[in-house]
Image: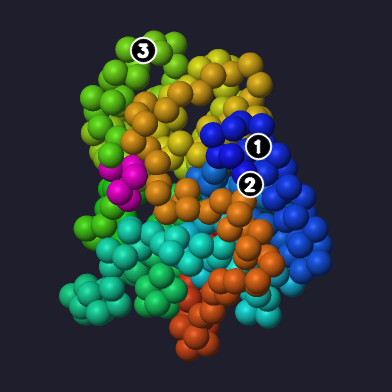
């Protein structure tokens, strides 16, 4: 029997799980995709890890018949929308997103009637039904580019108000109508947390995610998506960074930037839903082929167009 309090037993247990996952992955002709906020052990076994945009692209490129998506529900939905002929599995069916739950189709339709001349730009952190009601999707890494490239002067931006506010500062020529949604993880980061971290690490550059509150972004040296954070950390001559996003980011940042230091400004930057996925659940998912994410055809086709417009728009921008 495994002794959870014995580090050697825990290491051996995880080693066996990893070996089992490797075997099952081959048997099922599966690929494992993991978001940057996943546990270290999940990112370690993933065939590909990245942000929402990178994972959407990876899902389209994959040749395997089965996609095991280590993330939250809306991410697995996006993979299913873009790959109707493949089986998409979410290891933990309860892994949802509170931000995605802050908007409903009925409320969005009411807003669209109120502003009939507006294009609906839908943050990828939303359900398939909301994507189907939108004109184009975006991620935190391309939100500014997407809003800039669409023709409409007025934009309904859903559902994250903080990301929408940041986009407004970068695209002042557009009239952006904000939805009152927010990320429960990023909103926990306060001005006080950042000031304290800066005092503790005076040589560190503070990089904030655009889902953070405006007052936190005002203190940032740079505002980047998770992909942007990775890129900046690699090319920057700085040796120390304060990372204003979910703590799972530290695994890959530290792995890919030997000799550089990375700090989280508060221990509260943990997404409980992202951390639900464990090696045990991944192994169980592959062994039992659960939990499959399916999107009804009537929703999938409209949502697919929204996602594909985003991917297409990326090829039309130059900044």
Q: Residues within 10 Å of mark 3 (few under 14, many from 20)?
A: few
Residue 48, compared with residue 29, is above or below; it is above
Q: Earlier in the sequence, mark 1 or mark 2?
A: 2
Residue 284, compared with residue 246, is above or below; it is below
Q: Give the residue drawn at x 55%, y 39%.
A: 4
Which of the two discs, 1 and 3, sits closer to the camera? 1
Q: Give the residue drawn at x 34%, y 69%.
A: 119
Front-most of 156 and 11? 11
Front-most of 293 and 253? 293
Quarter holding residue 185:
top left
Determine whether the residue tagged by mark 2 lies in a helix, strand or loop. loop
Which of the two discs, 3 and 2, sits closer to the camera? 2
Q: Which residue is mark 3?
A: 200
Which secondary structure type mostly characterizes the magenta part of the structure? loop
Q: Earlier in the sequence, mark 3 or mark 2?
A: 2
Residue projecting furthest to the left: 114
Q: Which residue is mark 2?
A: 1
The region drawn magenta spans 183-187
Residue 129 falls inside the magenta stretch: no
Q: Give the residue drawn at x 61%, y 54%.
A: 280
Residue 9 numbered mark, or none: 1
Q: Give the residue drawn at x 67%, y 44%.
A: 13
Residue 227 position, x and y percent, is 55, 42
Instruction: Give me the C-alpha separation between circle 1 and circle 2.
Output: 9 Å
Instruction: Give me the C-alpha separation between circle 3 and circle 2.
Output: 43 Å
Instruction: Give me the C-alpha separation between circle 1 and circle 3.
Output: 36 Å
The reply, left or right, for residue 50 in relation to residue 157 is right
Residue 283 position, x and y percent, is 66, 59
Residue 64 position, x and y percent, is 76, 67
Residue 306 position, x and y percent, is 48, 72
Residue 206, compared with residue 116, is above or below; it is above
């Amino acid at each position: 029997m495994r002794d959870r309090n014995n580090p050697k037993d825990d290491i051996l247990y995880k080693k066996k799980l990893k070996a089992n996952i490797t075997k099952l992955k081959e048997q099922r002709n599966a690929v494992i995709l993991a978001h940057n906020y996943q546990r270290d052990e999940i990112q370690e076994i993933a065939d590909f890890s990245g942000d929402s945009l990178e994972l959407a692209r990876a899902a389209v490129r994959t040749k395997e018949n089965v996609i095991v998506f280590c993330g939250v529900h809306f991410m697995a939905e996006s993979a299913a929308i873009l790959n109707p002929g493949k089986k998409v599995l979410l290891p933990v069916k309860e892994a949802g997103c509170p931000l995605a739950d802050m908007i409903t189709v009925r409320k969005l339709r009411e807003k669209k009637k109120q502003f009939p001349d507006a294009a609906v730009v839908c943050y990828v952190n939303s359900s398939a039904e909301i994507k189907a009601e939108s004109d184009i999707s975006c991620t935190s890494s391309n939100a500014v580019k997407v809003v800039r490239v669409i023709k409409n002067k007025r934009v309904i931006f859903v559902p994250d108000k903080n990301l929408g506010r940041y986009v407004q500062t970068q695209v002042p020529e557009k009239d952006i109508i904000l939805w009152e949604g927010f990320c429960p993880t990023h909103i926990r980061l306060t001005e006080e947390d950042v000031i304290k971290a800066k005092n503790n690490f005076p040589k560190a550059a503070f990089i904030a995610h655009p889902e953070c509150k405006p007052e936190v972004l005002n203190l940032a040296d740079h505002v980047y998506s998770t992909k942007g954070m990775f890129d900046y950390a690699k090319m920057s001559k700085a040796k120390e960074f304060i990372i204003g996003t979910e703590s799972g980011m530290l695994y890959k940042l530290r792995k890919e930037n030997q000799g550089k230091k990375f700090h989280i400004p508060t221990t509260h930057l943990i997404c409980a839903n992202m951390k639900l996925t464990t090696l045990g659940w991944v192994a169980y998912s592959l062994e039992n082929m659960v939990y499959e994410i399916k999107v009804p055809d009537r929703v999938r086709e409209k949502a697919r167009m929204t996602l594909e417009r985003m991917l297409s728009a990326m090829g039309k921008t130059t900044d």
